């Protein structure tokens, strides 16, 4: 039984699975319009007001599952026709209003948007309201509440607003592609474009005479994601899909920790580079601090570079929890290193498109990293690894500031900008919890962190230096 947090994830998975199933047999173009009917058969709608709208929305999901508009490289996109069932939102007077005599809300409103009915209870004129929130602060009964849409509530960089038709609109000048809105939207109206067809194409070509290896770069946050099978069985399934080998991105994390420790010793102040959403956040909101972003590639970039330097013909596919990775591999510094990206949701769809009975498979070895590299997947792990790498190198101590989520990142960056940060290394993670809270996870929650801890304890190497030295054993 496949486990997903929400039914929205299940619908997304079913679309991806059918797209992948048809792509393996080269019959996608002939049957792509039939996918909505496969998922929503019959004449009775199960998700929307009518079967025609239901299938139209599914058609849009299919379009993004096959890559969407190739000229639009933006990863996070809105399905407009799916985004209309949320209330307009904003400040509203609730039933807690007592119709008091003080009328502090009225006095606080500089736009004169507050009026009172015959019952003396307050009402907000939306045509005048500017959503400043002063009325809510002034109300002694906390009777005025800000009903933000889930997507707006989840977006900590304030990149989402409402369009003319009350649909969600993304400001890409602010968006960092963290995917918080994707996971939060109750209607699945915001989603990430998929590169699953590109990955299938790489695998098919490698098996049809082009003679290159395709490496799966598997993020350490995979621990505990596939709860119905053992990790070794999932690695076997990945190989059955046509990947030549599955390599731990945690080994790239060990490499990155070593390099960042060296870089910190040279520059004296540094922010981490492992989270592409955090890197984007610094560049867009704190450009004066951008020179302090570590020049070390992310763990995925480090291990991909290592593999490409050994075999220039090989292809690499990152598999992890992160929608922002789909923007990272398009950056200039990653050109030619990472060939494509899959989320864990997409990996599950890919496995099931081949009808693999994962529980019946044997276990493959998956042991390339240290405990420190594996713990990169959770908040605090990067700081621990960089501190350990510095210690192993005999350099000065790292004074890390661990930022769990964008709001904590913002606070630390503000202090750094003013020169009052109590530390010399910022670990920035856009997702709360770290990578284990990524939008592309099959499941979310505290259990993910404990699974990563257990995965770390089972690492083949005890030190970062040993893991990096052992990298030569990868075939």
Image (cartoon, grey):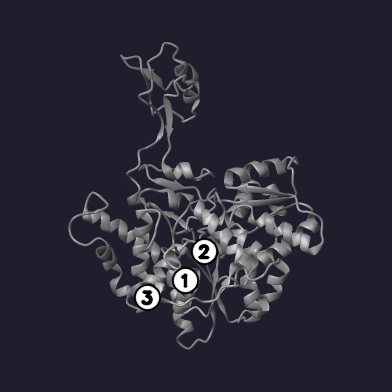
Viewer-side label of 2, 3: 2
Q: Residue at x 33, y 45 (%)?
A: 84
Query: Distance from label 2 to label 1 (Cα)?
Result: 9 Å
Q: Is residue 18 left or right of residue 458?
A: left
Disc 3 element: loop
Which tag, 2 or 3, sits closer to the chain's start? 2
Compared to residue 195, the image places residue 106 above or below, namely: above
Q: Quadrant of the C terminus?
A: bottom right
Q: Is residue 272 visible?
A: no
Q: Is residue 93 visible?
A: yes
Q: Position of residue 209 (x, y in %)?
A: 48, 88
User: Which residue, given by chain and number where applicable, does mark 3 sit on?
Assistant: 354
Q: Do the residues under discs 2 and 1 have CB atoms within 8 angstroms? A: yes
Query: Distance from label 3 to label 1 (Cα)?
Result: 13 Å
User: Which residue, given by chain and number where applicable, does mark 2 sit on?
Assistant: 222
Compared to residue 100, the image places residue 397 above or below, namely: below
Disc 1 element: helix
What number is the disc on residue 327? Answer: none
Viewer-side label of 3, 1: 1
Q: Position of residue 356 (x, y in %)?
A: 38, 75
User: Which residue, given by chain and number where applicable, does mark 1 sit on?
Assistant: 234
């Amino acid at each position: 039984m496949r486990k997903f947090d929400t039914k929205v994830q299940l619908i997304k998975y079913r679309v991806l699975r059918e797209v992948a199933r048809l792509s393996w047999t080269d019959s996608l173009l002939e049957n792509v319009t039939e996918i909505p009917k496969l998922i929503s058969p019959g004449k009775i709608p199960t998700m929307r007001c009518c079967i025609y709208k239901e299938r139209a929305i599914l058609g849009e999901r299919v379009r993004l599952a096959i890559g969407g508009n190739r000229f639009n490289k933006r990863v996070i996109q809105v399905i407009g026709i799916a985004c209309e069932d949320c209330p307009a939102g904003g400040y509203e007077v609730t039933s807690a209003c007592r119709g008091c005599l003080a009328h502090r809300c009225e006095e606080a409103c500089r736009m004169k948007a507050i009026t009172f009915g015959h019952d003396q209870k307050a009402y907000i004129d939306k045509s005048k309201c500017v959503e400043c929130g002063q009325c809510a602060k002034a109300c002694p009964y906390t009777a005025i509440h800000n009903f933000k849409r889930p997507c707006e509530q989840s977006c900590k960089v304030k990149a989402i607003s409402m369009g003319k038709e009350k649909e969600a609109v993304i400001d890409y000048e602010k968006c960092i592609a963290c995917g918080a809105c994707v996971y939060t939207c109750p209607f699945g109206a915001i989603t990430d474009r998929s590169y699953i067809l590109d990955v299938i194409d790489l695998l098919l070509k490698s098996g049809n005479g082009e003679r290159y290896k395709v490496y799966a770069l598997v993020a350490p946050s995979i621990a505990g994601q596939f709860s119905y099978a053992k990790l070794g069985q999932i690695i076997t399934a990945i190989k059955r899909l046509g990947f030549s080998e599955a390599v731990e991105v945690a080994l790239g994390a060990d490499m990155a920790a070593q390099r960042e420790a060296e870089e910190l010793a040279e520059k004296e102040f540094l922010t981490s580079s492992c989270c592409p959403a955090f890197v984007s956040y610094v560049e867009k909101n704190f450009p004066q601090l951008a020179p302090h972003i570590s020049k070390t590639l992310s763990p995925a970039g480090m291990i991909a570079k290592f593999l490409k330097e050994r075999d220039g013909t090989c292809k690499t596919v990152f598999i992890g929890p992160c929608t922002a990775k789909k923007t990272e591999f398009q950056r200039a510094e990653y050109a030619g290193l990472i060939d494509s990206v899959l989320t864990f949701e997409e990996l599950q769809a890919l496995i099931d498109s081949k009808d693999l009975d994962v529980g019946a498979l044997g276990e493959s070895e998956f042991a390339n990293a240290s405990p420190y590299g594996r713990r990169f997947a959770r908040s605090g792990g990067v700081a621990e690894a960089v501190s350990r790498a510095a210690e192993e190198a005999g350099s000065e101590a790292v004074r890390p500031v661990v930022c769990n989520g964008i709001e904590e990142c913002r606070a630390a960056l503000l202090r750094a900008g003013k020169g009052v940060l109590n530390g010399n290394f910022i670990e920035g993670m856009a997702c709360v919890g770290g990578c284990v809270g990524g939008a592309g996870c099959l499941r979310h929650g505290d259990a993910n962190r404990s699974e990563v801890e257990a995965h770390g304890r089972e690492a083949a190497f005890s030190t970062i230096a040993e893991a990096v030295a052992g990298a030569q054993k990868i075939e």
